[in-house]
Image (spheres, rainbow, N blue to C red):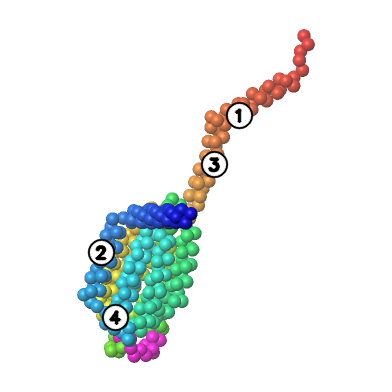
Amino acid sequence: MNETKDINFWTKMKNVIVKAWNATKNWTIKVWKYFTLYEKLWFLSITILAFVFAFVFPEEDIGGVNGKVIMVLYLVDIFSNILCELLISKQSKYNFLVSLIVEFTEIAICIVCAYRFATMAATIFFWIPVDIISFIMWHRHPDKKEAEITEVRKLKGWQEVAVIAGIVVWTVVVGTLLTLIDTEAGILSNSPKLEKAVCYIDACASAVGIANGLFILFRYQEQWIAWYICTFLEIAINIMAGQWVLLVLKAGYLTNTTYGYIKWNKYIKEHKNVSQSPENSTKEENNDDEKIEKDILSPSSQNEETKIEIVDNQNTNLDKPKDDT
């Protein structure tokens, strides 16, 4: 009896393992096919470059934290960031789930390096809530033809002016406040002038980042322009701080931002005014009316009408009094 139970147990375990393997295999194939050849090559090349830079430019210990631990954080940041960027370019709502990994990783990097406090605050109080809200918002606005992608649009002129004014004010106010923070063991603590300059650059980067988050939330194409600006600001910070491996991520940002901007722009041109056009809704209503008319006038319905007429005629004939003559 015990031997039979053991055999049944291992048979069940084997079936579970086989099912799990097949499910994983099918999922992997589906994900692999989801990305184009360019996207796969881009992702792999950035990942390989990041590991090469990690070995060529090892990170030093900062504030008692081992340099290898810091490098691992950098690599996780790069890997999750490029995956997130790729999903955004494909108008996928799942980019926000990956973005949460990015946010927590970057918070850890800011704490360890004792720098970029504006970015850290923006990440905690803005980006994490916005990622969750954006996932819900994007889920509610799928493309009418392709449910896996989300509808996107463009900003108006007055909106652009308001955003730029807000970024300037934020940069000056927050940058000034950041210069008042004293960090003795930070990554830039040996260079007071650079540390002060980074305060203002970081303030500007956080402002542009917040604008970018709002653009993504409301599905505006201008989020790619914000990415361009934010990327160049972060390149300056990374060079000042000697974070060479993160320059690989910025190279990925620049190439994918161009790719994403082209894709979104193409989508917007192809779907211009489709979602908001009253004519479109009228056309859809007309199409529905035409379908109803076709159903009514179809041969099958005509046959039904003919049958009804025949039955009515028969009933009429039966109701008529018979002629005795």
The residue labelled by disc 2 is 45
**Front disc: 2 or 4:** 4
The secondary element bearing badge 3 is classed as: helix
Q: Classify 10 Å Cα crowding around label 1: few (below 14), some (14-19), many (20 and above).
A: some
The residue labelled by disc 3 is 289
First in sequence, mark 2 or 3: give its number.
2
As for residue 185 lying within the magenta part, the answer is yes
Residue 198: percent from the left, percent from the top? 32, 82
The residue labelled by disc 1 is 305
Distance from disc 3 to disc 4, alpha carbons, whole Å, reads 69 Å
Name the residue type under label 1.
Glu
Q: Classify 10 Å Cα crowding around label 3: few (below 14), some (14-19), many (20 and above).
A: few
First in sequence, mark 3 or 4: give its number.
4
Residue 89, quarter of the rendered image: bottom left
Residue 182: percent from the left, percent from the top? 37, 90
Q: Classify 10 Å Cα crowding around label 4: few (below 14), some (14-19), many (20 and above).
A: some
The residue labelled by disc 4 is 67
The residue nearer to you, when weighing 321 against 222, is 321
**Front disc: 2 or 3:** 2
